Amino acid sequence: MPTSDFDAADGGPPPRVLVADALLPADGPAVPCPAGVLLAGELARAGAAHRSGPIPLPGPGTEEGVLTAVFDGPDGGTAGLGAAAAPDDPAAGEAARAAFGAWRAVAGVPRRVLLAAPRSFCAGVERAVEAVERALEQHGPPVYVRKQIVHNSRVVAELEERGAVFVDELDAVPEGAVTVFSAHGVSPAVHAEAERRRLGVIDATCPLVSKVHAEARRFAGRGDTVVLIGHAGHEEVEGTLGEAPERTVLVENAEQAAALEVDDPGRVSYLTQTTLAVDETAGVVDALRDRFPELRGPDSADICYATTNRQEALSAIAAETDLVLVVGSGNSSNSVRLVELAERHGTPAHLIDGPADIRPGWLEGAAAIGLTAGASAPPALVDEVIAALRGLGPLSVTEHETTRETVRFSLPSPVRRG
Ligand code: SF4
């Protein structure tokens, strides 16, 4: 490989390993390497600086240290894997050999993907992301967003590139600036602070979260102790607790529910976070009802349609698969619940932000892979995972749809057109 392949570009660290995006034979067509992103992920975990580019297939005169493999690919074609380390960097050579060896060991075998549907973006997330996009169009950057607009690192990074500025609290927002509240909702105290600071607020709280806030006000207003079932520290929970902080208690599991003490056991209501596991939450409600027989709940379930649908869709396929991959970020509650659900079905499951997070060891012996995505994960990420898996050998993809979603929410009024 010419040493110029390992020169630094754009002032960044020099790439010490080149990952093949195609293998170039001396004659004949290039061999595509769509699984290069998987190899790159392994190198990133090993701390090896890398970039992608074409690599010539070995022939007479090829230097040592160029690692390539060509195997059966999708649709009767071929696919390849390739890596080459800077000749003057033994550590990079070692990292390249380890990453290449690990992925080569699981490449070239047929697999099938069972794709759960519905998956990926829900109506509340689409609305929130579009609200930020519209705000950027209408006002130009910067547009401030309190907390992550939705819990997905790709979505946040793309909006940041376009001029969104994500802040933890409103004191980081200049007086009067355009500010979007995230899909998870905020407490009345945050609304009051925004008003005090004369911020131009675009409230992208999901309408289904707003419904829970309204229930909290209603239940507290009639004098009940409001038991909120949810996860401590989650932004949605913080916002809902803030509606009636003096009358609301948080319960995270059935044990806490069974031990709960309240002023008047005859006046207790419950609410839930919208993104909990349906089966686990039923157990917590049962424990509350055992303790407080007159327990009252919301008119319709607080766990939202999107959370419920994604769990049902995954339940329908999880037991048939050897491995479940859930596309979503670590702070996405509904995505984490999908991983736990698959595990309760007895299938090993992993949360991935994208294809680079997949580990080669997960695919050993995994002929059938279940694939889904949390409500905050963009559909494009699922496509990227499938494309990378296609680079490992023949792949059949079958979608299993349990229901069709038609829910749409109108945009917040400040960014609504017409
Ligand atoms: S997961 Fe449910 S509550 Fe959360 S934004 Fe989506 S639709 Fe709304």
Image (cartoon, helix red, strand yellow):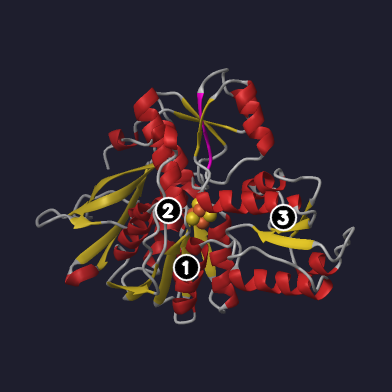
Observer able to see residue 159: no
Q: Is residue 76 left or right of residue 310?
A: left
Task: Please identify the dominant SS of the magenta region.
Answer: strand
In the displayed structure, 43 sits above or below 277; it is above
* Badge 3 amino acid: Phe
- Residue 216: x percent and y percent? 69, 52
Name the residue: 26% across, 38% down: 2
The answer to which of 57 and 130 lies nearer the viewer is 130
Of the numbered discs in the image, which one, if any, rests on residue 309? 1
To which quarter of the image does residue 227 belong?
bottom right
Total numbered badges shown on the rendered structure: 3
Quadrant where the N terminus is found in the figure = top left
Mark 1 crowd level (few <14, some 14–19, many ≥20, 10 Å Cα): many
**The magenta stretch spans which residues?**
178-182
Label 1 element class: helix
- Residue 398: x percent and y percent? 31, 74
Nearer-N-terminus badge (2/3): 2
Marks 2 and 1, how far apart at CA: 12 Å
- Residue 74: x percent and y percent? 23, 68
Residue matched to label 2: 123
Of the numbered discs in the image, which one, if any, rests on residue 219? 3
Q: Is residue 326 inside the magenta stretch? A: no
The answer to which of 409 and 130 lies nearer the viewer is 409
Q: Is residue 180 inside the magenta stretch? A: yes
Mark 2 crowd level (few <14, some 14–19, many ≥20, 10 Å Cα): many
